[in-house]
Amino acid sequence: MTAGELLSASLEDYLEAIFHIVKQKGAAKVRDISQRLDVKNPSVTGALQSLAKRELINYAPYDVITLTQEGEKAARDVIRRHEALRKFLVTVLAVDEAEADENACRMEHVISSTVLERLIQFVKFVETCPVGGAKWLEGKGYFCKYKKGMFEECASCDEISRNERVT
């Protein structure tokens, strides 16, 4: 698949489903994909043919389906976007797991890599900041009030915060 060949949201969902099924069972069958995505067998067959033309899956009618190296790479990218969005929704916005998963599935197909990376950084910050000393600066993102800069320097933040509280 060349960089110019973007996949539709539907085809990305098929790759994601195939990845999970292969991980669980070693290979996927049309029936497995149909059940996982709740679609009819003819729809699965059409999607598989399209993915096979793009050389993302190994597919022959009535045979098992596996991902090619390029297909696995594309599937892992979709899963990474999904998991990052899901984690943000659950960890930062306190959305319940089922709703977060459902929304992440829709959002994973349209989020830019720049926004995704910022979101991942923010979730890491929320999970690791020992004192919650950050504030939002319009147009800049989250900054720590104890350090001049972004939250990459959080390791010494706790020490500074403790000293500030003592004095």
Image: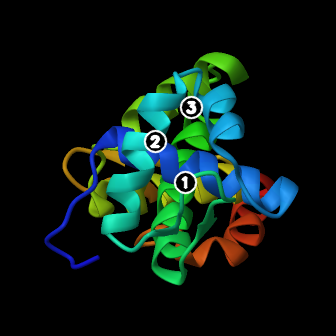
Instruction: Pinpoint residue 81: horizontal percent, then vertical percent.
Output: 48, 53
Crowding at label 3, few (<14), some or many (≥20) Cα neighbours within 10 Å?
Answer: many
Q: Quadrant of residue 17?
A: top right
Q: Which mark is residue 61?
A: 1
Q: Give whichever of 18, 157 is nearer the camera.
A: 18
- Measured in 3D between alpha carbons, the distance from the residue under mark 2 to the one under mark 3, in whole angstroms, is 33 Å
Q: Residue at x 30, y 47 (%)?
A: 111
User: Looking at the image, is 98 positioned above or below residue 47?
Assistant: above
Q: For the residue labelled by badge 1, is the local secondary structure a helix, a strand or a loop?
A: loop
Q: Are marks 1 and 3 in contact (CB under 8 Å)?
A: no
Mark 1: give few (<14), some (14-19) or many (20+) Cα within 10 Å. Answer: few
Are discs 1 and 2 less than 8 Å apart at CB? yes
Q: Amino acid at mark 2?
A: Thr
94 on left or right of 14? right
Q: Quadrant of residue 99?
A: top right
Q: Is residue 21 left or right of residue 49?
A: right
Whether residue 138 is visible, yes or no, is yes
Residue position marked by numbered label 3 in the rendering: 89
Sequence-wise, which precedes: disc 1 or disc 2? 2
Secondary structure state at the residue bearing disc 3 = helix
Q: Are marks 2 and 3 in contact (CB under 8 Å)?
A: no
Please, what is the three-letter code of the amino acid marked with disc 3? Leu
Figure check: 22 above or below 108: below
